[in-house]
Image (tube, helix red, strand yellow):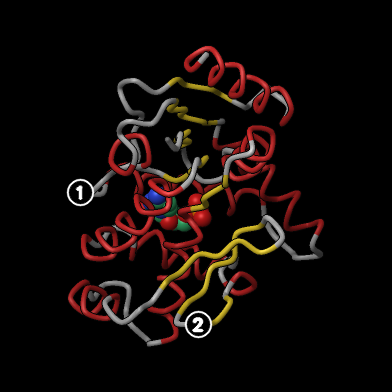
Amino acid sequence: MSKCIAIDGPAGAGKSTIAKIVAGKLGFIYVDTGAMYRAMALYMIKNNIPKEDSEKISSTCQSADITIKYEDGAQVVYLNGENVNGLIRTEEVGNMASVSSTNGDVRKKLVELQQKLASETSVVMDGRDIGTVVLPNAELKVFLTASSRVRAERRFKELTAKGQECNLEKIEADIIERDNRDMTREISPLKQAEDAILVDSSDMTIEEVSDRIIELYKSKTC
Ligand code: DC
């Protein structure tokens, strides 16, 4: 029987870094659901769909074929047959994803894909609604968070390391705005599942957080 660990939390809390390590250590597959919402957002941008046109978003998402493959152990997202991994990590796509992911038809399509993946293999899945909607029976649910300042500083370091010019205050303001949108949307808002364990990574190292999650998983399943 496949096993699942659900990791939810706001943008920049370190979910993907941690989920990848935990999956590697337990021999599970890591599923990055944010990448699926980003691929869908890229499709909306490519088709010039305005953010505020929810009817167009609903109809357009029907012709987006999003598939996930694993190549050399890493998740690769295909959008209508094209590998879009290199195109979905921009602020523009992230901002569109934050809006298009509030659409019920987009969510229905992607939640089905996520549930299918988890039924076939053991997964560590990260996102916003994994513990509450996608995998309500996950063996372990973690709500991973950190203060908005710490999350902005992490993002600032990442962008400056890539040589991109950026402003810490602006990054923090964007993070707060995205949190608000993710937490207040009508469908599947970001919230801690009742049976999820809160882990605040503000003052923890990556290793401390991943060790803690593995410890929690073992204590729940052994
Ligand atoms: O985690 P991320 O920044 O790559 O996610 C991009 C957007 O997708 C984010 O604004 C919230 C949304 N998202 C979602 O609504 N549900 C998920 N399970 C994962 C991401």
Residue closest to the eye, 74 or 132: 74
What is the secondary structure assignment of the residue under circle 2? Answer: loop
Relative image position of residue 95 (x, y in whole percent): 45, 63
Q: Earlier in the sequence, mark 1 or mark 2?
A: 2
Q: Residue at 46% of width from left, 53% of height from top?
A: 33
Relative image position of residue 65 (x, y in whole percent): 38, 76
Q: Residue at 60% of width from left, 61% of height from top?
A: 70
What is the secondary structure assignment of the residue under circle 1? Answer: loop
Q: Residue at 51% of width from left, 48% of height from top?
A: 175
Say what amino acid the circle numbered 2 marks: Gly
Q: Which residue is mark 1?
A: 186
Say what amino acid the circle numbered 1 marks: Glu
Q: What is the number of the mark on residue 81?
A: 2
Nearer the camera: disc 1 or disc 2: 2
Relative image position of residue 18 (x, y in whole percent): 63, 37
215 versus 86 height, above or below: above
The reply to whether residue 104 is in sight is yes
Some atom of ligand 1 lies within 8 Å of the CB belonging to the residue at label 1: no
The reply to whether residue 174 is in sight is no
Quick check: 203 left or right of 174? right
Q: Residue at 26% of width from left, 77% of height from top?
A: 62
